[in-house]
Image (cartoon, rainbow, N blue to C red):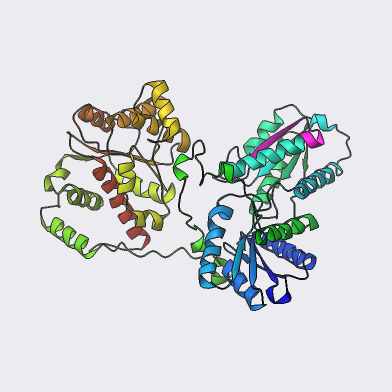
């Protein structure tokens, strides 16, 4: 590579509100720069901190780079490395079509990182005056925790390699967020395994809020269990091994050898429990907080995101003007009007709202749940696809329907229930109470939801039950209406359907967005 074509390396960090994490990341970048003196090395952040990744790319190109390798400054390939950072690189490649962009693999389970983990463990053991056999020690490896089972599985693989390679009696894996078991629960479980010593190793690159949480949980366990020695190992930190792996990943990217574990990537192949995410578009979720601290000032709390009120299409607006004038709405509570008028719009029938039933506070509970839990569980994909995509994205709400998943089919066969009912049962198992349930097709889905509520203590934030049909429809709607344990919206009779169930959620999302925008309808 000639000087004219010298390599630019952009180290892409996550970013943090914790200044210790930012300081250590930038110290590592300096170490990378020192160990790759012939390359142009800049850094940027995905969230919160500055400069942004785009700014780091611009600075690198200004220094004369014509080939550019963006290296994720993260340990494992989860959402940031699979979605957010590639989205940044794609955007930059469009902005600079004459530049060769290469995206590197995350650090992953590199042999040098295994050696560094070994070093951190030995350093922790050396702080103790006691001599304890490794066979009498349990290693507790604490990962970040993600929604990607591939990345979470790599934490378990790391633990197994250290357990066998260093001769621990056992290894226990827990996480500081998102995945379970959480660190406090994991430490309690490890303490019950009967080992004389626990070595707590954060599987993290840098200090920060989550590492501090891990060490605080270890201190709490030490106080509660004075008979067990609890040692706190250091995280990876600023170390030549980490810098060398980053440089290696940059070289691999330029040579076309950047490899991720795509054989178990949930976006490429059907992974058990994540089947619906195959082929999911790469949508970056970090835009609202990109460079946020620099915009707001490091000493001040970030401002809440700004929201604009819902703007209907002119034809839609005219339809709702007609609906508002088409009957007397004074008998209905004001909180119900958006949902009710959208049901009229969906059905084309002013009388459709006469049979509707709302439990007290159902609309208010649903709006709060959409904003807090941000997940809607549906019985069929028709309800899911009927939800307004723009509103889902603005509010950051996920939807889930398991009716076509392989496990749902297996459950349906094994338990002798419909796939819609099996999908509801899977939603209960996956998401617990933090969900809005919207049923628009299958009375059996309502029956299963009511059974789980009454017999197994399920408490979804709101259940919408509006299937259409003649077999079991009236009966299951009445069962839902009598189910006093949860907020609920349903109707009487045979009318309804997936568009109705979707319309109820759409109406609540519109009200939620307008509330965030501070909009009061006239």
Q: Is-magenta flag for residue 173?
A: yes
Tell me the magenta residue range.
Answer: 164-180
Q: Which x, y percent locates residue 241?
A: 78, 55
Is residue 257 inside the magenta stretch?
no
Q: Quadrant of the N terminus?
A: bottom right
Q: Which residue appears at 39% of the width and 29% of the height?
A: 422
387 to 20, vertically: above or below: above
From what the image shows, is residue 341 above or below residue 412? below
Q: Is residue 173 left or right of residue 168?
A: left
Q: Is residue 499 above or below residue 13?
A: above
Give residue 409's position: percent from left, percent from top. Answer: 40, 29
Residue 297: x and y in percent read 57, 71
| Most foreground residue, 71 or 119 | 71
Q: Is residue 52 visible?
A: no
Q: Quadrant of the C terminus?
A: bottom left
Quarter of image, res 51: bottom right
Q: Residue 379: x, y in percent?
A: 34, 37
Q: Is residue 40 above or below residue 343?
A: below
Please indicate, yes or no, whether residue 80 appears anywhere in the rendered image: yes
Nearest to the observer: residue 105 or residue 31 = 105
Number of marks in picture: 0
């Amino acid at each position: 590579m000639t000087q004219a074509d010298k390599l630019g390396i952009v180290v892409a960090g996550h970013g943090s509100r914790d200044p210790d994490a930012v300081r250590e990341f930038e110290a590592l970048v300096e170490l990378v720069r020192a160990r790759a003196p012939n390359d142009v090395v800049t850094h940027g952040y995905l969230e919160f901190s500055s400069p942004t990744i785009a700014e780091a790319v611009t600075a690198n190109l200004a220094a004369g780079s014509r080939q550019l390798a963006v290296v994720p400054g993260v340990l494992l390939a989860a959402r940031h490395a699979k979605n957010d950072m590639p989205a940044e690189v794609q955007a930059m490649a469009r902005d600079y079509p004459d530049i060769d962009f290469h995206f590197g693999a995350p650090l992953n389970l590199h042999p040098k990182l295994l050696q560094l983990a070994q070093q951190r463990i030995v350093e922790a053991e050396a702080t103790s005056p006691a001599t304890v056999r490794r066979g009498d020690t349990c290693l507790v490896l604490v990962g970040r925790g993600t929604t990607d089972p591939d990345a979470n599985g790599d934490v378990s693989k790391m633990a197994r390699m250290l357990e066998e390679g260093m001769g621990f009696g056992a290894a226990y894996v827990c996480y500081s967020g998102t995945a379970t078991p959480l660190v406090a629960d994991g430490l309690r479980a490890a303490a019950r395994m009967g080992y004389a010593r626990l070595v707590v190793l954060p599987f993290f690159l840098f200090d920060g809020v989550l590492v501090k949480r891990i060490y605080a949980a270890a201190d709490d366990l030490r106080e509660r269990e004075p008979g067990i020695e609890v040692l706190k190992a250091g995280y990876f930190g600023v170390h030549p091994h980490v810098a060398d792996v980053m440089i290696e990943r940059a070289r691999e990217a330029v040579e076309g050898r950047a490899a991720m574990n795509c054989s178990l990537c949930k976006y490429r192949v059907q992974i058990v429990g994540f089947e619906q995410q195959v082929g999911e578009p790469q949508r970056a979720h970090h835009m609202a907080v990109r460079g946020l601290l620099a915009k707001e000032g490091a000493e001040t709390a970030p401002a809440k995101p700004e929201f604009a009120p819902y703007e209907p299409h002119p034809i839609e607006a005219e339809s709702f003007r007609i609906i508002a004038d088409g009957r007397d709405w004074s008998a209905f509570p004001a909180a119900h009007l958006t949902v009710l008028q959208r049901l009229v719009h969906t059905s084309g029938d002013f009388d459709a709202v006469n049979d509707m039933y709302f439990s007290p506070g159902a609309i208010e509970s649903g709006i709060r749940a959409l904003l807090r839990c941000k997940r809607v569980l549906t019985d069929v994909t028709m309800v899911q696809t009927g939800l307004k995509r723009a509103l889902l994205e603005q509010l950051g709400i996920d939807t889930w329907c398991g009716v076509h998943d392989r496990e749902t089919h297996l459950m349906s066969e094994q338990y002798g229930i419909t796939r819609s009912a099996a999908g509801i049962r899977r939603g209960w198992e996956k998401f617990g109470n933090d969900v809005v349930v919207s049923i628009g097709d299958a009375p059996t889905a309502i029956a299963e939801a009511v059974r789980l509520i009454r017999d197994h203590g399920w408490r979804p934030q709101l259940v919408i039950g509006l299937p259409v049909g003649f077999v079991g429809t009236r009966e299951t709607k009445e069962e839902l209406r009598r189910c006093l344990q949860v907020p609920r919206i349903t109707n009487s009779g045979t009318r309804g359907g997936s568009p109705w169930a979707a319309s109820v959620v759409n109406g609540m999302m519109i009200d939620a967005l307008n509330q965030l925008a501070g909009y009061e309808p006239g």
